Amino acid sequence: MFKKVDLSIDFLGIHLDSPFVLSAAPPTDELEMAEHGLEEGWAGVILKTTSVEGNPVELKNPMMSSFGPMSRKVVGLGNIDLISHHHIDVVSSRVEYLKKKFPNKMIAASIMGASKEDWQNLVYRLKKAGADLIECSFSCPQGSMGEEPGKMLAQSIEATEKVTRWVKEAADTTPVLIKITPQVTDIVEVAKAVKRGGADGITASNTIPSLLGVDIYTFEPYPSLFGSGAYSGLSGPAIKPITLRTIAEIAKNVDIVISGNGGAFNWRDAVEFMAVGASNVQFCTLPMHYGFRSIRDLKSGFEHYLKEMGFKSPSEIVGKALKNIKNQEDLVNPKTRSDIDLDRCIGCGLCYAACNDGGHMAISFDSKTRKPYVNEEKCTGCAMCMQVCPVDAIKMKEVLDSNEYYFVERR
Amino acid sequence: MGRNLDLTQALIEAERCLYCYDAPCEKACPAHVPIPEFIQSIRTGNLKGSMELITLANPSIGVCGEVCPEEQFCQSVCTRSAIDYPIKIRELHKFVTDNVKLTDLELQLPPLNGKKVAIIGGGPAGLACARELRRFGVKPVIFEKKELGGIPAQEISKERLPYNIVREEAKQILTLFGAEVKDKKISDLQDLLGEFDAIFVATGLTEELELDIKGVNLQNVHTARKLLKTIKSSLRTDVGKRVGVIGGGNVAVEVAAALKREDPSRDVEVVYRRGLKELKAFKDEIDEALELGVGFQFLAIPVEIKGENSVEGLVVRRARLGAPDESGRRVFEEVEGSDFFIPYTDIVIAIGQKAQEIFPEIKKTHNGLIEVNENFETSVKGVFAGGDIVRGASTIVESVSDGKKAAIAILQYLQGGKNV
Ligand SMILES: Cc1cc2nc3c(=O)[nH]c(=O)nc-3n(C[C@H](O)[C@H](O)[C@H](O)COP(=O)(O)O)c2cc1C
Ligand code: SF4
Ligand code: SF4
Ligand code: SF4
């Protein structure tokens, strides 16, 4: 009944009916799950990372923990999962099956090996099975790079370049993505190494090594397995700002295709990922939390956004925000002041607390009227008060050449 | 009537929704509005997408956003109640429809396929059916002698349902969905069947049930729906200062509230045979009436209206509640010798509606309602029916749901029927 917008893109020569694919993770670890995801409307799947038959994968459960507000929503998800316990024979037969059943969807696989032989062997077998794309996990927080246990492959510039080269050599014309970690000193150097190695693109990024929490009465870390725990890979909304920065840094400095992944939870996040340089967006925690049906609002919201903005194709937004990302010293210096809309204000006093104990002591609070007032002399326009106001009653205002400018971004 | 949520309030409320997997709210909605999905879209700021979902499921979203008895449907089963209290689903629904117009969305309808369906009655069921038919390429022609919109347009008070919402919704069915309206009374179905490929009867209930007691013919005895129409057309009623409204349904409560609103100094009392718990009106309507100061005479059976020419009062007999009947509602029993007199200047009869006698060739139930099978087919081939004329007095959303489902059944009939 409603006119639809064409959301399709070309990603490394692969046709995607939307930019949204399922990343290598539990949602693609069983054949039925991958099928269900594609039926619900995801544009493609990257099957959970597989390895050669000789690689034992010993999972420890419970492997998940999380943190969030008291409403019990998951803001940050932590896992001590490993790669898939399904080895390459199983995975390549799935690729074959899925490709037949869904010829118009992207069927990709993710791999992890220890030696050159392993990596290339994995690639050959997936190519034979018909994989549209191969992603290489250089960044599983629980994994290791073989030679140096406990270290992620993408944390070494040399290893990244070397292994990328092995993989690309074997993959030949099949597109290769290298999935990196933001947990490095200089992400640009890693991205350059990936490019030198000959990969077609980068997946930026993965979960981030973290410690989800500690029980303050028993001192057991989460998730606790009879009292002990390990560092977790953190995913979900909590890591979105880190991923955004990672994508932007790479996009600004290295000419390579980027697949955005890590913390995207709705279509708005996806737009942001693309605006800073991602060509498509992968999701894992969103479908893990709410199911594959979450694709429906992703597509619908994205579609209305494109229409409203007058974009003809999703690829038009890729990198659109990059030119606006500068160094702090290159920014102009506005003379802003806090501007409180007293009609909207509900008198909670949070801006008073924030400004007096964490800003510049520029807000006073009248206990009789329960309204805050800004002392323009003292206010520097730092915008701390604006962050805490629960009803968006505060804006930052600058008067320049007798025109009024407002700064209103809060999230 | 519902609160108008602003964006912050809507987001906070939407955030409370659990996005249940097998959402009970959606199943309990007669129009099967995909509630968790539309709320999820509010959460991401995708209001247009949210609107698409609601309007696809429910052609009468504006009206339902205002007056749907959510505590009887979706909200009554909300999972969130197990944590604190149910999601304010109707208010979120209203938030979406208040902020997005159907005309903000780009419609794409298939070309007309040459089939034409006559819809008798332009109320919620008829309009819903018209829209659904056009969505699938069939031309709808609505026959309506009065104003489009049915009961919501003509009888629900404007305090509860702003008039422009009903009118706008009806207008959209005409302009956006190309339905045609004919102001013509239909008495012969066969004539129509020659011209149209199928017929949908959605005439609603137009006759009022009569009360069989002495004095009903006195001056100042009114019927509820006539009064509601008068008030709705912004005319003043000639009702006096002490009014007894006989009945216990939505119409009784609605007319009592409307009379109190018209003149707050007027005493208005609902006279009902059973108790508060048995009252059939929706809870928020009862609350609203109570807030306006409407009184209730419970356990009171009208026996006789007293008066010379004009009403002087009502003789009432006490009732007591007995055992529950098969529907679970407690029956009332008369208490002998308990008659008492209440002075009233006016009596309003609001004990319900019945079907008018129409289309003798169609098979009816003993109540005079049209009998249909599960495909909304009547006993006459090619003639379908739905809404109140089939269900008896019901809700708008149920009529909408009938109209939608009947349209699908009609489409199937058109594909396989002899007229194809
Ligand atoms: C339980 C779990 C297991 C994962 N396993 C893999 C894996 O086998 N290979 C891989 O490359 N990434 C794996 N990931 C990382 C995800 O693919 C994704 O990069 C990460 O969760 C960040 O995206 P998100 O915030 O959308 O979840 C896993 C994530 C989770 C939560
Ligand atoms: S999510 Fe499923 S598999 Fe995991 S613990 Fe719960 S029931 Fe078991
Ligand atoms: S934080 Fe916002 S609502 Fe609270 S006192 Fe300040 S301006 Fe008012
Ligand atoms: S039942 Fe309640 S909590 Fe669950 S989806 Fe429906 S509105 Fe949301």
Image (cartoon, rainbow, N blue to C red):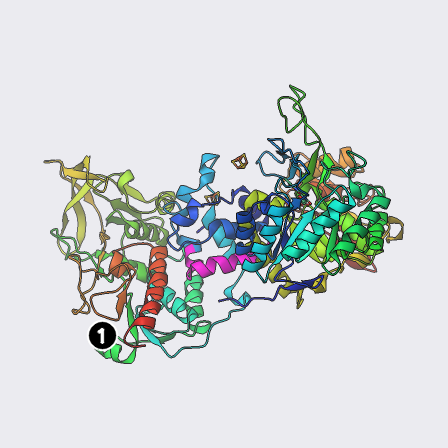
User: Is residue B408 something one can see in this rendering?
Assistant: yes
Image quarter of residue A305: bottom right
B50 in the magenta segment: yes
Q: Tell me: residue A404, above or below residue B144.
A: above
Which residue is drawn at the image coordinates 83% and 49% (left, top)?
A161
Q: Residue A175 location, x and y as percent?
A: 72, 58
B272 in the magenta segment: no
Q: Amino acid at mark 1?
A: Leu
Image quarter of residue B367: bottom left
Q: Chain of mark 1?
A: B
Q: Alpha-carbon neighbours of circle 1 within 10 Å: few (<14), some, or many (≥20)?
A: some
Q: Residue B386 location, x and y as percent?
A: 29, 62
Residue A332 lies left or right of residue A212; in this view the side is right
Image quarter of residue B166: bottom left
Camera-side residue of A110 and B411: A110
Q: Residue A30 location, x and y as percent?
A: 56, 45
Task: Return the residue at label 1.
Answer: B189
Q: Determine whether the residue tagged by mark 1 lies in a helix, strand or loop.
A: helix
Q: Tell me: residue A48, above or below residue B48.
A: above
Magenta-colored span = B45-64
Q: Residue A51 location, x and y as percent?
A: 68, 43
